Amino acid sequence: MAHPSAPLLAALADATEDGIFFDLAGIRRGYDTLRRELPGVDIRFAMKSCPVDEVLACLASAGAGVDGASPRELEQALRAGVPVDRMHYGNTVKSDRDIADAHRLGVRDFATDSVEDLAAVAAQAPGARVFCRLAASGDGALWGLSNKFGCSPADAVRILETARESGLTPSGLSVHVGSQQMTADAWHSAVECLADVLAVLGRRGIVLDHVNLGGGLPALGYLDRHGRPLEPPLDKIFAVVREGMRHLREVHGEHLAFVMEPGRHLVADHGAIRAHVARLAERRRPDGEPRHWLYLSCGKFNGLYEMDALQYPLVFPTHPDDEHLPAVVAGPTCDSDDAYPQGHALVHVPRELASGDPVWVLASGAYALSYTTQGFNGFAPLPYTCVGGGRP
């Protein structure tokens, strides 16, 4: 399980108001580690996980590119210093206007998964490079991503043949094994599927230049719904990916390059929220059983959107040795979804918590800002601060 860095803990301890803090040096260390584990892989940060200018600039200065999903994301990445030749439009869902806008920005690499989208790319971005996203089951991931994106192997062959006939460059294949993927087997299955499609394409005279292995690399600092540390087999995942790359080059040629799109893996464990207690209260259920509720100043709509699928580690710095009691954790809004749902274990919290006491929400650097509403129920988005500089 990952532990917050000293600069991150110091920033939380010094804070007197709510906010989210990002450790840039920690993010940079994570990027450098990823490059060592997967040498030669082109890392393109999935910026939807943390669309923060300072984070983008930190990663760009280290050599990372960007996986953008809209023209506005691509524009932000350009302003942050990401070269246009190190970014691609990774969303297979895009309007004619969005394709044209991205093309005007200089983007030349587009994901696709349907002939309809491909026709729009050919019309709005003539001569562009396209890579086709294969569907994956998402088994083993906290968020499977198995329905909205990706096509069958047969469709991928048809799409890339059509791309060649349409004046586009069929450049690659991509796959996404699901967000916070907890198994190495998912990448093994993805490689087998990619290898089969590459073999068919090779027989039809289509030689691709890259494979995009997508996102899914897990963060290490989360708890599962029962409050137990999630322990993804990261070393085994890296080993399977390295072996998979060797196998795909054997199938399609040593020229084959590789891209990955990590998001939460780079930022989740290097961000933390300083929140506060709104109230610790006891209410009886209809059956008469008492239950404690810990209401925090942040919840699903302002920082903790992913609380349906996991628990965030909580630290109560002013009550380190107090007696604890089990409670449901909930956010401050007048919305019943703003709470850990049924199926989550109760969280043990200090019995003497009072309104206003600080709470540190760890492993919250991914999606905390990007999923935040613009002020649902009048609860404002969290301000952010970057600490630690951009160097390890």
Image (cartoon, rainbow, N blue to C red):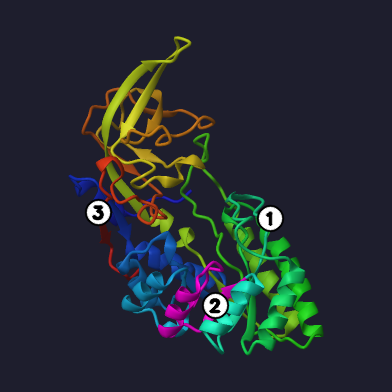
- Residue 104 on the magenta segment: yes
Q: Residue at x 44, y 15 (%)?
A: 285
Count residues near mark 3 (Cα–Cα under 10 Å), then give few for <14, some for 14-19, many for 20+: few
Q: Residue at x 51, y 29 (%)?
A: 342
Label 1 or label 2, whichever lies nearer to me, is 2
What's drawn in magenta, residue-wise? Answer: 88-112
**Picture quarter containing residue 81?**
bottom left
Q: Which mark is residue 164?
A: none
Indicate whether 268 appears above or below 250.
above
- Residue 111 on the magenta segment: yes
Indicate whether 314 appears above or below 126.
above
Residue at the disc numbered 2: 110
Secondary-structure class at tag 3: loop
Q: Residue at x 36, y 70 (%)?
A: 56
For the residues bearing labels 1 and 2, Cβ distance under 8 angstroms: no
For the residues bearing labels 3 and 1, Cβ distance under 8 angstroms: no
Q: Which quadrant of the rendered structure holds the C terminus?
A: bottom left
Residue 320, image x and y in percent? Answer: 30, 32
Label 2 or label 3, whichever lies nearer to me, is 2
**Picture quarter containing residue 304?**
top left
Question: Which tag, 3 or 1, sits closer to the chain's start?
Answer: 1
Residue at the disc numbered 1: 137
Farthest-out residue, left: 16
Q: Residue type at mark 2?
A: Phe
**Picture quarter containing residue 18?**
top left
